[in-house]
Every structure is written in structure tokens, then in C-alpha cells.
Amino acid sequence: MSSKTAVVVLSDPSTGTDEALGRVFDALATAWEFAQEGEALVLFQGTGTRWPAVLADSDHPAHELYTAVKKQVATVASSGCTTVFGANKGIEDEGIKQIGQNQAPGTPGVASIRELVESGYRILTF
């Protein structure tokens, strides 16, 4: 079994639902758990790129977990998704590196899941 795990956050915080919160909360908890015994990566992709700005609020119920994960786990965002979903300010304010190796037509480049798989990561989506 791979000791490298990429946790991909796709849920949209703007829905304001318990499901969206549950997905990001479980994604962060899963990344934290995998980081205890191996290498973990959190990738904010799609509308999930909106989460860092929301999680930065110290009153948010997942803020403490988010802060702990950011200290321990590599955290990145899809550059194309960040642009498309208007999340640039939040990603930049949080100091999250943007990646865009997948030069899909009509995009400025999105994160490459293929590259992660070829680098030995198991992929979990939330």
C-alpha cells in the first residue's frame, strides 16, 4: 500500500450545507491521519479552492484542524480552478502554492491528478 496519499477537496463552501462542511472536515482529518504514518498532500480543486479563505476564520468549526493540517501537510491548490472559481485572494492570503501541470484546453492549467498517481500517490476525494 502506498505511503503517499493525496486528499482532494472538491466540496463548495458557498453552499453553506452540513454536507460541504462534513466533506472538508473529513478531508482534513484524513490528511492529518495519513500524515502521521506517511506522506500526505491536500489539494484544493474545483470549488474546493474557496475553502482556505473560509477555514482561515478563527471562528470556523474546522479552523483548528485546518491550521494543524497546514503545519504538517503539504497544501496546494489548482491554479486554473482558483481562477475560474474566484478564489485567488483566499489562496494567496493563506500562502498556498498553486499548481497547474495539466494544460487542459481553455484553462490556465489545472492540478494534474495523473501526475500525482504516477508519483505514487493514492487519491482520495472529498
Image (tube, grey):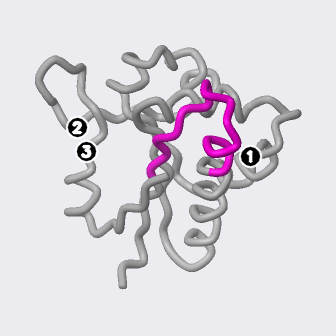
Q: What element does badge 2 sit on?
A: loop
Under mark 2, the amino acid is Gln
Q: Earlier in the sequence, mark 1 or mark 2?
A: 1
Q: Earlier in the sequence, mark 3 or mark 2?
A: 2
Under mark 1, the amino acid is Thr
Q: Is residue 70 above or below residue 106?
A: below
The span shown in magenta is: 8-22
Q: Is residue 38 above or below residue 11?
A: below
Residue 59 percent location from the top left of the image: 88, 33
Tell me if 92 is positioned left or right of 53 in this view: left
Q: Residues within 10 Å of mark 1 (few under 14, many from 20)?
A: some
Mark 3–mark 2 contact, CB under 8 Å? yes
**Residue, x 78% and y 42% (percent of image)?**
63
Residue at the disc numbered 3? 112
Residue at the disc numbered 2? 101
Q: Residues within 10 Å of mark 3 (few under 14, many from 20)?
A: some
**Residue, x 57% and y 62% (percent of image)?**
31
Mark 1–mark 3 contact, CB under 8 Å? no
Q: Earlier in the sequence, mark 1 or mark 3?
A: 1
Mark 1–mark 2 contact, CB under 8 Å? no
Residue 88 percent location from the top left of the image: 50, 17
Q: Which quadrant, please, contains the N terminus?
A: bottom left
Tell me if 65 is positioned left or right of 102 in this view: right
